[in-house]
């Protein structure tokens, strides 16, 4: 499977709310670089991150553009996050169901047809401004 196909499958599963589907696309030793945060290693850590995020956010990704390297080992995606902030996340503003629309992107390393590294990016200050105004 090409890098583009792996990444597209990952985000298709995300948009369907198919947590097991997108976790199945990760290597056991996946590296997750959290937006403007630390690095987590392993599928168990990623599963815990997804559970935490699912408690506070409902998101759908649109306007997806996926890129892949010719050798299939690297890729990237750019998209719009359409979300609702449904439960307060520690250290962030209070959640009151605020809606947000935020450009974001991610960089990937692909190994043996699975995601071995994902590095996410969005502008946290813009997100804070959006939910604080709502």
Image: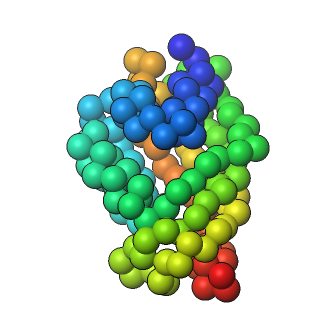
**Occupied quadrant, residue 63:** top right
Question: Which residue, as the protein is rendered here, is positioned at the far right?
Answer: 63
Does 125 sit above or below residue 17? below
Q: Position of residue 28 (x, y in %)?
A: 27, 32
Tally of marks: 0
User: Is 126 in front, or is 72?
Assistant: 126
Res. 71 visible in picture = no
**Occupied quadrant, residue 47:** top left
Side of 63 relative to 14 (left or right): right
Q: Position of residue 95 (x, y in %)?
A: 49, 78
Residue at horizontal 49 percent and vertical 68 percent from the top:
86
Does 25 sit above or below residue 62? above
Question: Which residue, as the protein is rendered here, is positioned at the far top?
Answer: 1
Res. 68 visible in picture = yes
Q: Position of residue 126 (x, y in %)?
A: 66, 75
Residue at horizontal 57 percent and vertical 40 percent from the top:
15
**Occupied quadrant, residue 71:** top right
Q: Position of residue 105 (x, y in %)?
A: 63, 50
């Amino acid at each position: 499977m090409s890098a583009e196909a792996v990444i597209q499958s990952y985000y298709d599963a995300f948009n369907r709310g198919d947590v097991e589907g997108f976790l199945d696309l990760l290597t056991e030793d996946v590296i997750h670089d959290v937006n403007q945060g630390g690095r987590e290693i392993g599928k168990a850590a990623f599963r815990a991150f997804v559970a935490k995020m699912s408690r506070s956010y409902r998101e759908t990704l649109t306007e997806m553009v996926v890129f892949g390297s010719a050798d299939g080992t690297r890729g990237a995606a750019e998209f719009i996050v359409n979300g609702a902030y449904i439960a307060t996340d520690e250290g962030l503003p209070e959640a009151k169901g605020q809606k947000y629309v935020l450009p974001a992107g991610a960089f990937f390393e692909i190994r043996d047809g699975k995601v071995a590294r994902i590095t996410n990016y969005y502008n946290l200050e813009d997100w804070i401004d959006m939910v604080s105004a709502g």
